[in-house]
Image: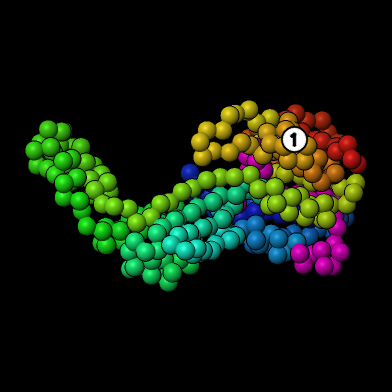
Amino acid sequence: MLLIPLLSRDPHTTESPRWSEQPARTLEAFYVKQFNADVTQLRNVWSWSDYYQQVEQMLLQSATFDRVIFISHGGFDGPVLKNAVFKQELQITGNKGEFFLLSESQPGLKNALTVTYDTQKNRIFSDYMVSRWRELAPMKPTEIWHLLKALEKQLQPLDGACYQRDCSPDKLAKIPEQQRGYRLDLCELICREPLFELKKSVEISPERFFQFTKSLSSLATADGLIFFGACNPGSAAPVKIPEKDETEYLINSSLAGGPHLSYVHLVSAATGRVVAGPIGDSSAEDIVNRIIMFESGRPQRNLCIVASNTN
């Protein structure tokens, strides 16, 4: 059997990102004692690139498992890791420069960031992008925006007429004192001709999703079980109409013949394997207890188990 503790933490807590390793040790001891099982564990999986690199080595050895168990944070769209860049590039076509970053925290949901600019508008800015774009990859979108805006502020002069119209002493005197700092910052932004445009989006990526499910199909035997020990893989996600710059849930998309009732249903349809996972929230202790009860044949509530019709 294969245990896959994913290393990440809830940003709203002080938990260790290695919290998933303890339930993995508990489950390893259970399977060895109860079934005398051979247990393999992936180590130091901080990103999906880490996961794929280790899985690739296993598949070269033709390793397959009757249990593939993830222990992680998660949601309606599956297991979660820290958002990590998997592709970055700077493209220049004519007078248009475009820098883009692609990243993911959940397989199948692609986070895209693009910075576009006119290469002829300001030579210093253009040279900066050409020489420094690789340094942007580790940064958050807000950090990239603030960095480039600070550079823009150094390079672009204020439009005096605009500034006087909105931020002259007479104008500032007419608004509450606590709002004047915000107004000045706003004038600094809107009263300079911009040098770039930054956009963010989240898109469903069938290619990334099926890369993940193909790895699961290769790891799990035809009659094996894939278990997602996390919050909500077995829960029905609310149906929503995506607003601008939003995307729908994976399970509400057309992936693998969707929409599907839950992430467990989606992965089962895509892999042809039996897939299981909790309905609702789950702690580390809950995950361990659910698996032990399942393997012991004891009845339990709030566990979704789906056997694909292709099995």
In this view, the residue in front, 61 or 252, is 252
Quarter of the image with the C terminus is: top right
Nearer to me, 132 or 237:
132
What is the magenta range? 56-82
Query: Where residue 49 appears, x then y in whole percent?
Result: 65, 61
Number of labelled discs? 1
Q: From what the image shows, is residue 251 above or below residue 210?
A: above
Residue 144 percent location from the top left of the image: 41, 57
User: Which residue is drawn at the image coordinates 15% and 33% (left, top)?
Assistant: 175
72 inside magenta stretch: yes
Residue 51, magenta (yes or no): no
Tell me: 128 left or right of 159: right
On the image, the x and y values in percent for residue 218 come to: 83, 55
Identify the residue position indicated by label 1 in the image: 258
Q: Quadrant of residue 277?
A: top right
- On screen, residue 297 versus residue 55, left or right, reads right
Query: Residue 109: percent from the left, percent from the top?
Result: 62, 46
Would you say 134 lies left or right of 78 here? left
- Viewer-proximal residue, 224 or 287? 224
Q: Is residue 44 visible?
A: yes
* Figure check: 283 above or below 85: above
Taking the image as drawn, is residue 290 in sight? no
* Residue type highlighted by circle 1: Gly
